[in-house]
Image (tube, rainbow, N blue to C red):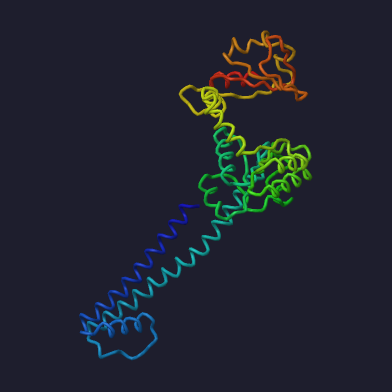
Amino acid sequence: MIKSRSMVFRRMIISLFLLFGIVTTGVVGYQVLENMTLLEAVYMTVITISTVGFSEVRHLSDAGRVLTIIIITTWITIGAYTIGNLFRTLVEGELLKTFGRKKLDKKIAELSNHHIVCGYGRIGKLICRELNRHGMHFVVIENDPASTPLLEQERYLFISKDATSDDVLLEAGIMRARALVTVVKSDADNVFITLTAKGLRPDIYILARASDEKSTSKLKRAGANRVDLPYDIGGRRMAQALIKPAVGDFLDLATMGMDDSLGLAMEETRIREGSSLVGKNLIESNLRRDFGVIIVAIRKNSGEMIFNPTPGETLGANDVIVVLGKRADLVRMNDTM
């Protein structure tokens, strides 16, 4: 779409240069061939290209008449080209928007088990970047027109409408979505989006952004499963970097994958029903022996979180294990789960 727009713009620039060239040729030509003053040459050129039929400034020689014929013929040809380009610019611009939007809508309608990101500010951009980096499907809802070129450049699926609307959330596929994250600028809008989303689909997981503790309690009452305060998290991480820099570096490497040379990652994996791991303890599972991973925590199906589980901890169906290891080993492990 961006490439097509640049081509249309290039055609318009060429047309303007050609028209300017005709006017310049006419003015210079009448001055040279008919010995006219600058004003007379400009006047003669204007009445020639406009074909208004006013009388000539002075009697033209054969060379002047030939120049006039050339100017009129060329002007009509290039004028038609310019008008055609202008019309094409207007029509193609609308067509590109229409067909481009329909293509996006079709892709959004085909999404399933995806994430809905409401808001494409600084936090929204980071969330989308990480989701995209991990190959996860998502759709962005952002009603600020200034964000449209950025979303198009990143080739994200997006809807340029108000996320507080029931119809917009339905258009984003909330009934098929895996989770919704609301990170718009206003806490009040985040609360309203949460209420709307829960009203449409009570079981959807919602992650919300808050700017203070008061908003956190409101968002939780509205139905948000988790509420984060970005400034609070950022401040704690920066303080951690000062107090315990080694711990901070380790967490960055494990959770953010900032050093690709190590290939480390911290991932979570759900134990499916019928898995060979169900009913076995950590020793019997042989996860460490077979894949070289470290079991950091287990979130039981009941919701209980067990940190640093003992070797005798038994694994159950739908338990989620949080593991640390090299990416290649984690991929192998996920394939067997």
Out of 88 and 160, give the one closest to the viewer.
160
Residue 258 relative to residue 221: left or right: left
Q: Judge by depth and name the residue closer to the eye, 76 or 288.
A: 288
Q: Is residue 207 above or below residue 283?
A: below
**Residue at 47% in and 56% down:** 5
Q: Residue at x 67, y 53 (%)?
A: 162
Residue pictured at 68% horizontal, 40% vertical? 208
212 over 149 or under it: above or below: above
Residue 321: image x %, image y %?
A: 67, 20
Quadrant where the image shows the C terminus: top right
Q: Residue at x 77, y 45 (%)?
A: 200
Q: What percent of the width, then of the height, locates residue 199?
A: 79, 45
Rendering quarter of residue 291? top right
Total count of labels: 0
Give the x, y percent position of residue 82: 42, 69
Query: Residue 2 at what x, y percent from top left?
Result: 48, 52
Using the rendered view, name the quadrant where residue 25 is placed: bottom left
